[in-house]
């Protein structure tokens, strides 16, 4: 059933009661509760792990793990030995030993990524995508979209497009759709309700689309999903969890549901989301990299993880009852950033599910799963700060009782993903100190131990050059694997602009990734140091739209990086030209941090590259039908103007909307006599004092607006205000 039909009114057509003719239907079904007990990280009885229903499916990929981890260890050992030979030309100093240790840690990280990508490369060479049609399903599945202060035009259009696509499979009757809102902005909240009511009006009485707004966003997204599961999870055998920027085709969702039904031991099945719809320069770099290189990395990860895989928090299907039984997250003792509620909850939920005996795995060859990415360097650094804290918080969880070995490896990978930046920074600093020692420190001729030669740090330049070449080859190899696979696939090659443009795009991505890398190194290092100092991060809504950030904000965010780059460049040049040459990629990236960050968010630059078919992905050359439909629906929702309207004014102007809003409010606890809530008292006083709705809209602060919208009596008081002042 299409969302937009000729016989139904347009979304932008007025706000009279006819638009909410179906508002008498509750926004949510009656509750069907599931218990979600809080789990323990300190105690676990192995006898509590369930026995597999289908033991034949539980094959552990030991040979693949041996290839990845054994190969990674062998490469690391070789790299460490070569580095030792580089620094041990003469008697090795303590600084050189520190450099050796830091190099070994950093090299082990890229060596493991290389062997995993190599496994994925071979897997994709011989593998094939899933093309079988699903004829029937046995159970009900709910598609859950958590939102938090998002654009309603974007999110509701995406959900509507997903629903249309599922309906087109002929199996739509097996699916319901739940929008679970944690929004804390009053205007956005009312926009969500208006968009929801308009969508249900267009879909008719068989919409099976529901909406719930949570009064307090306790435990953020994890708490949002947990609230849904405990209240309505009993209706559904499975749930497909989305993000606010997710898109999934009906075929993809149906295949996930069929895969879950076919595997009675599956707890979570993760799809591989590809990035689409991005047009700024930085987002296009990310989009190209994720599309061309991402499948290689994800396939390798899926192959060695097997049924001990991970969960990325969205675009995955989950067995609802198993999730409720085993994924109740405890608060960690102490204060944030290492205490409090778990931020990166998805890794932990996968670990708990696997501990309980349920399989967690990925289907990287399942097509039709999409997401979007932040539009600029600053936007991704804001999100990255939250992820950094969540991943470092896992250091308190990685040793939990009962976790399988692969689960701990996933945690270690996530932690190292952020510790790698300060390790790289320390390696650079130690390298500079060694060069300073070589050029300015006086040799120690008479040490405590007798020697014929002074203690003077020396290097083997030829070995050093060879080791650098090996490091670069291992670092860039996964990108080469992805490019090769794209080039040999005729359909992907043509959709990506042809071989020449694909190669040039890859070189462009590698070049600018090298420029952005030192900036991200300092940003991530700063985040790690802030977390170690006990500074908590907030949970700001993610900016998803294309567009640049004001230049003054860019200068403020990157001025320190620029100064460090200039100082490092001048110092390196004064110390030794060889040091300057060695550090030049890092120096250039930092010195140009401000213009690079400015360029990252430029829509015009990204569109220019798109017109010249550079950094083009196959999904741009041959756009998915669901993306085109979502974009069309987004334009329709935007035309209705829900996101631009003042929520209080919209509520005041529409009695049907007020009635629907009243019906969607949860029953609150009665106020005790004598207890005065300051925010409510102030909001009520302002409403009493206001002569028009315009006065109230101006006077009420954001927090007071939310108080009004949560209180039926105050909404009623708001409704009594005249639209305009009476004439004298």
Image (cartoon, rainbow, N blue to C red):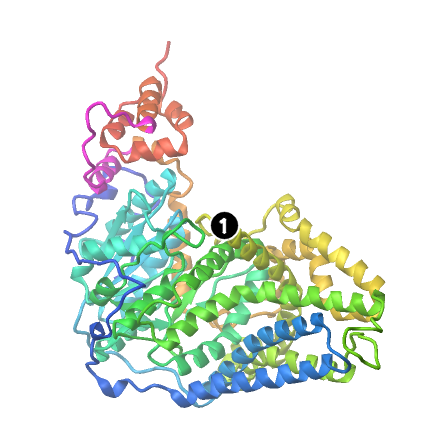
Is residue 93 found left or right of 149 in the rendered image?
Answer: right
Is residue 234 found left or right of 551 in the rendered image?
Answer: left
Residue 695 x, y percent position in the rendering: 39, 23
Return the residue nearer the eye: 61 or 383: 61
Residue at (55%, 55%) from the top-left corner?
527
Q: Which residues are magenta?
A: 654-679
Return the residue nearer the eye: 573 or 253: 573
Q: Tell me where residue 129 sits by quadrant.
A: bottom left
The residue tagged 1 is: 534
Residue 481 x, y percent position in the rendering: 55, 82
Q: Tell me where residue 517 sits by quadrant.
A: bottom right
Residue 678 belongs to the span the image colors magenta: yes
Q: Is residue 265 above or below residue 604?
A: below
Return the residue nearer the eye: 353 or 277: 353
Q: Is residue 329 above or below residue 637?
A: below
Residue 293 belongs to the span the image colors magenta: no
Residue 704 x, y percent position in the rendering: 36, 31
Is residue 209 found left or right of 576 in the rendered image?
Answer: left
CA neighbours of label 1 inside 10 A, class few (<14), some (14 to 19), many (20+): some
Residue 728 x, y percent position in the rendering: 37, 9
Tell me the quadrant of the picture where the N terminus can be found: bottom left
Label total for image: 1
Is residue 216 found left or right of 49 in the rendered image?
Answer: right
């Amino acid at each position: 059933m299409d969302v937009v039909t000729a016989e139904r009114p347009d979304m932008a057509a007025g706000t009279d009661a006819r638009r909410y003719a179906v508002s008498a239907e509750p926004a949510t079904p009656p509750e069907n509760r599931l218990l979600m007990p809080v789990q323990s990280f300190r105690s676990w009885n192995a006898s509590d792990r369930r026995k597999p229903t289908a033991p034949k499916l539980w094959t552990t990929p030991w040979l693949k793990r041996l290839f990845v981890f054994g190969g990674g260890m062998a490469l690391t050992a070789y790299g460490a030995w070569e580095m030792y030979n580089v620094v041990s030309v003469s008697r090795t100093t303590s600084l050189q030993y520190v450099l050796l240790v830091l190099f070994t840690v950093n090299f082990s990280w890229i060596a493991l990524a290389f062997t995993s990508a190599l496994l994925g490369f071979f897997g994709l060479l011989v593998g094939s995508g899933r093309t079988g049609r699903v004829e029937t399903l046995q159970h009900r599945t709910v598609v859950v979209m958590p939102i938090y202060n998002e654009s309603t035009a974007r999110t509701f259009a995406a959900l509507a497009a997903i629903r249309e696509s599922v309906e087109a499979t002929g199996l739509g009757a097996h699916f319901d759709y739940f929008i679970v809102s944690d929004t804390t902005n009053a205007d956005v909240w009312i926009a969500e309700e208006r968009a929801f009511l308009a969508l249900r009006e267009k879909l008719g009485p068989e919409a099976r689309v529901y909406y719930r707004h949570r009064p307090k966003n306790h435990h953020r997204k994890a708490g949002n999903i947990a609230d849904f599961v405990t209240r309505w999870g009993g209706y559904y055998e499975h749930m497909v969890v989305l993000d606010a920027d997710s898109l999934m085709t009906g075929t993809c969702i149906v295949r996930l549901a069929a895969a879950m039904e076919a595997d009675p031991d599956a707890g979570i099945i993760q799809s591989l989301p590809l990035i689409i719809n991005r047009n700024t320069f930085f987002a296009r770099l990310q989009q190209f990299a994720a599309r061309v290189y991402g499948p290689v990395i994800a396939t390798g990860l899926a192959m060695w993880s097997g049924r001990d895989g991970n969960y990325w928090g969205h675009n995955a299907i989950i067995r609802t009852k198993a999730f409720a039984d085993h994924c109740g997250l405890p608060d960690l003792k102490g204060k944030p950033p290492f205490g409090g509620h778990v931020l990166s909850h998805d890794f932990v939920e996968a670990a708990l599910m696997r501990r309980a005996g349920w399989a967690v795995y990925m289907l990287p060859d399942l097509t039709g799963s999409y997401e979007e990415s932040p539009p600029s360097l600053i936007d991704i650094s804001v999100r990255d700060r939250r992820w950094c804290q969540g991943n470092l918080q896992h250091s308190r969880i990685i040793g939990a009782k009962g976790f399988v070995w692969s689960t701990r490896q996933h945690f270690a990978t996530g932690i190292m993903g952020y510790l790698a930046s300060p390790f790289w920074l320390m390696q650079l600093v130690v390298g500079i100190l060694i060069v300073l020692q070589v050029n300015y420190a006086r040799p120690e001729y008479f040490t405590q131990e007798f020697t014929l030669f002074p203690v003077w740090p020396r290097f083997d330049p030829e070995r050093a050059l060879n080791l650098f070449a090996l490091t670069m080859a291992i670092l860039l190899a996964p990108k080469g694997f992805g490019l090769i696979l794209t080039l040999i696939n005729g359909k992907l090659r043509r959709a990506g602009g042809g071989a020449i443009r694909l190669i040039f795009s890859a070189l462009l991505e590698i070049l600018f990734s090298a420029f952005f890398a030192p900036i991200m190194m300092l940003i991530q290092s700063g985040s790690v140091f802030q977390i170690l100092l006990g500074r908590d991060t907030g949970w700001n809504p993610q900016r998803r739209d294309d567009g640049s950030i004001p230049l003054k904000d860019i200068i403020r965010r990157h001025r320190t990086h620029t100064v460090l780059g200039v100082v490092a460049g001048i110092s390196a040049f004064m110390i030794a030209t060889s040091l300057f040459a060695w550090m030049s990629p890092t120096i250039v990236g930092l010195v140009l941090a401000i213009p690079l960050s400015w360029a990252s968010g430029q829509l015009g630059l990204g569109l220019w590259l798109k017109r010249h078919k550079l950094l083009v992905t196959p999904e741009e050359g041959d756009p998915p039908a669901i993306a085109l439909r979502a974009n069309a629906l987004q334009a329709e929702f935007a035309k209705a103007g829900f996101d631009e309207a003042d929520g209080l004014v919209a509520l005041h102007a529409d009695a049907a909307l007020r009635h629907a809003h009243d019906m969607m409010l949860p029953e609150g606890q009665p106020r005790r006599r004598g207890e005065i809530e300051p925010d409510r008292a102030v909001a009520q006083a302002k409403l009493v004092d206001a002569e028009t709705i315009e006065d109230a809209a101006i006077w009420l602060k954001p927090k007071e607006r939310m108080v009004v919208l949560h209180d039926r009596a105050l909404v009623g008081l708001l409704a009594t205000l005249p639209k305009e002042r009476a004439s004298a």
